[in-house]
Image (tube, helix red, strand yellow):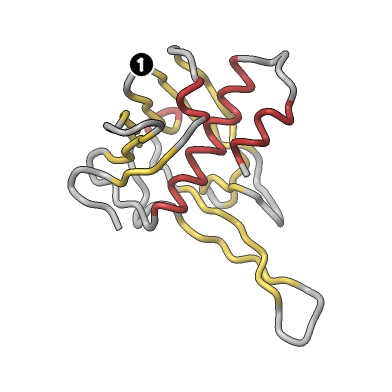
Amino acid sequence: MSSPEGTPFISEILERLRPGVLPLSAPHTDGIAQIDIKGEKHGDLDLVVDIGADLITVEREHGLPLQVEINIGEPIEGSSLKRVLRLPVFEEPIERLLMRRGDGPREWIAGGDGVRVVSEARIRKFAHTLGGFAYYKQNPNDAVSSVGDFIN
C-alpha cells in the first residue's frame, strides 16, 4: 500500500494538536501496541510523540522497534462468539513513524525510513487513536466524548 512518498490519509484530530513532546502509553501484547484490545494485555508500552507544526514523529521509548495491531472481532460461523483478529498496521516493525502534512485539507502522509503501511484504513485508525489520546492529554478538561468523535 505504501509508496516511496508515504501513505496519505485524512485526519481532523491531528490538526488540533499543539506543538510539543508527549509521552503516551499504549496497551501491548508481546511488545506490539494494541488498538481496541479484546484480550490479555501485558502492560503498557511507552511511546514518545513529538508534535511539530507540519510533522509528527512517533517512536517507542529507548529506540525499540514499533509495531501496532488493530483488534477486530470476527463472528464465528454458527456461534454467537467472535474470534479476535489482530491486524498489523505496518508490514514490519519500524524505528519511527513520520506523519507530515499533505497538500489537501486535513491531509497527512505517513512514512519514514523503512515504513511500509499495510493499508490506508489501518494507518488512519492508528493516527486517529493516537491523535485522540494526545489531544486529550493536551486538553484534559475537554469532554472525553469530543475525543471519541475522532477515534472511532
* Quadrant, the N terminus: bottom left
Q: Can you tell which quarter of the image residue 137 is in?
A: top right
The vertical placement of 69 against 15, above or below, is: below
- Rendering coords of residue 36 (x, y %): 65, 49
Residue ID at (48%, 48%): 68
Farthest residue, direction bottom: 78
Residue ID at (53%, 34%): 130
Label 1 Cα crowd, 10 Å radius (few <14 / some 14-19 / many 20+) = few
Amino acid type for the residue under numbered disc 1: Ala
Farthest residue, direction front: 105
The vertical placement of 7 against 147, above or below, is: below
* In the image: residue 77, left or right of residue 56: right
Identify residue for label 1: 53
* Quadrant, the C terminus: top right
The vertical placement of 26 against 73, above or below, is: above
- Rendering coords of residue 7 (x, y %): 31, 46
* In the image: residue 51, left or right of residue 141: left
| Camera-nearest residue between 122 and 146 | 146
* In the image: residue 116, left or right of residue 151: left
